[in-house]
Image: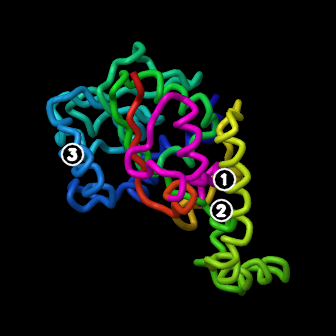
Amino acid sequence: MPHKKYRAFYENVDRQSVYTPEKLPETHGAYKSVLSFIDRYNLSKKKVLEVGAAKGLFQDLVDDYVGLDIAESLKTHFHKPYVCLLDDGIYPFKDNTFDAAWTWKVFEHIPDIDTALKELCRVVRPGGYVLFSPAWQCRPWAAEGYPVRPYSNFGLSGKLIKASIPLRNSLAWRLSWILPKRIVRHIFHCAGYRLRKFPTKQLKPNYVDFWMSDSDAVHSIDPHDAILWFQENGFKCINRPCHLRALTVRTGDLIFRKSG
């Protein structure tokens, strides 16, 4: 259930201009990904859901479009259907409603990510497609803006955290703990073990100061975990189909097709 601060944060009209300053779809960071997704799977005439639709910049890329987001105030930007998500997190659509869905840099911000993922899977029809592209591996130091604030803003512990960021961001450092975790998780997956909940690293979001991108992130999501979770829930990862490609995924879009 969304916290009051969570909903109020995204209802703030002034703050929305910080999140989605783009006025044309071509200037949005997801434009090429979404357009390629639509073209590759012939979705222009299909019924499509956008989860985390914001100001609906992509609503005219397909004919039959529905936007879904958390803020009622966003509705003024839409001339196609827009649905504001209720507090129970349940999508107000019947099973197998949509031929496809896309979502870009959204799920890392959703407190009840398990419900949101299950709902996304539920409303896509068998044979339908999902473009799933959160901001992967959000960093815990983003909430307080350590990379963008000067050292003078912090005490000794804060200065040490800021100084450690280049090392902790390095590929060698991250591989030292991410790869072993992935290998273990992959072995369990291949052995038939299934997760009850979607695995994420919980973060403390900042709903007061928006220092930088992902200051408000609630989860740090590993794309490898996402691949395995969708596979365990009846989807096939089209663009990372083999074990090695799943184990070595770093960033980028994931495209899934629902079985059946």
* Mark 2–mark 1 CB contact (< 8 Å): yes
Please state which amino acid type lies under the numbered disc 3. Arg
Residue occupying the point 37% across, 22% down: 126
**Rendering coords of residue 251 (x, y %):** 48, 62
**Residue holding disc 3:** 40
**Residue holding disc 1:** 205
Q: Nearer the viewer, mark 3 or mark 2?
A: 3
Residue 50: numbered disc: none
**Rendering coords of residue 76 (x, y %):** 29, 36
- For the record, the magenta segment spans 215-244
**Residue holding disc 2:** 143
Label 1 packing within 10 angstroms: few (<14), some (14-19), many (20+): many
| Residue 219 forms part of the magenta stretch | yes
Residue occupying the point 55% across, 29% down: 233
Please tell me which residue lies in front, 14 or 38.
38
User: Looking at the image, is mark 3 or mark 2 earlier in the sequence?
Assistant: 3
Residue occupying the point 53% across, 36% down: 231
Residue farthest toward the front in the current orientation of the protein: 191
Up the image or down, 78 lies above or below 255; here it is above
Disc 3/disc 1 C-alpha distance (Å): 36 Å
Residue 101 placement, left or right of 45: right
Up the image or down, 169 lies above or below 62; here it is below
